[in-house]
Amino acid sequence: MKIDWTPPEPRPGLIGAWDKFIGPGATNAEQWLQWSGTLGLTAVLALINLNQRSDLNWSTLQWIVFLLLAFDISGGIVTNATSAAKRWYHRAGQRFSDHFGFVAIHAVHLAAVAWFFRDGDWLYFAVFYGWLLLGTAVILRTPLYLKRPLALLLYSVTLLLTSSFILPTAGLGWFIPFFFLKLLVAHLLPEAPFQPNQR
């Protein structure tokens, strides 16, 4: 194994857009893990909710939004934790604004849950989005050697918020834990991108 912080150049064309999404040079094993993890978690979450569909009483649109959220966030947890993603998203030249912007655009996920599943609960949106942005800013401004323990501390507080102070969303009890795991832990931490010596 070796540590290599220099990502290869993204390939041209549409495949290059995929490279920029998951990190250029992702190994076959990394891509297999991403796809199997994404599809597997999405399937499990769907099966859980199908078993309680009469209690949820969701519309077709709500089911579509649920599946999109489950697919994106499940995939994001795995993808953002790969070495290929680490060396791409934390490559030389990436700034505070790049990472903060990546996290900030995920407002749409929280807004979708507030709108479609919580009857326009904008307090829910404000609390978790504010906490997300605050946690992101603090992690980004923290010295490297403290980033991991701080991210895990902030994530633990998030679990307390969603389990003890704000009622979880019916059918989406997993959403806040997965959402913050993807962003605060999987994405923001610049961990060493170990690479196999041969692929």
Image: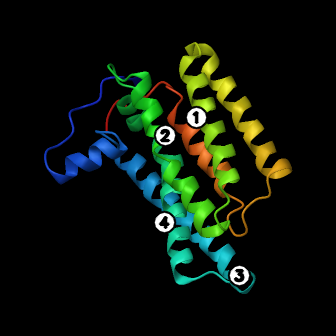
Q: Which residue is rendered at x = 64% and y = 56% of the image?
A: 175
Query: Which residue bears the numbered disc 4?
Result: 68
In this rendering, the label closer to the viewer, 3 or 2:
2
Q: Are marks 2 and 1 in contact (CB under 8 Å)?
A: yes
Q: CA distance from mark 3 to mark 1?
A: 35 Å
The reply to whether residue 195 is visible in this rendering is no
Q: Amino acid at mark 2?
A: Ala
Q: Are marks 4 and 1 in contact (CB under 8 Å)?
A: no
Query: Which residue bears the numbered disc 3?
Result: 51
Q: Amino acid at mark 1?
A: Leu
> Are there few (<14), some (14-19), or many (20+) residues within 10 Å of tag 1?
some
Query: Which residue bears the numbered disc 1?
Result: 133
The image position of residue 70, as x and y in percent, is 55, 62
Query: Which residue bears the numbered disc 2?
Result: 104
Q: Secondary structure at mark 1?
A: helix
In the image, residue 117 sits, relative to residue 191, either above or below, namely: below
Q: CA distance from mark 4 to mark 1?
A: 23 Å
The image position of residue 91, as x and y in percent, is 35, 24
Q: Secondary structure at mark 3?
A: helix
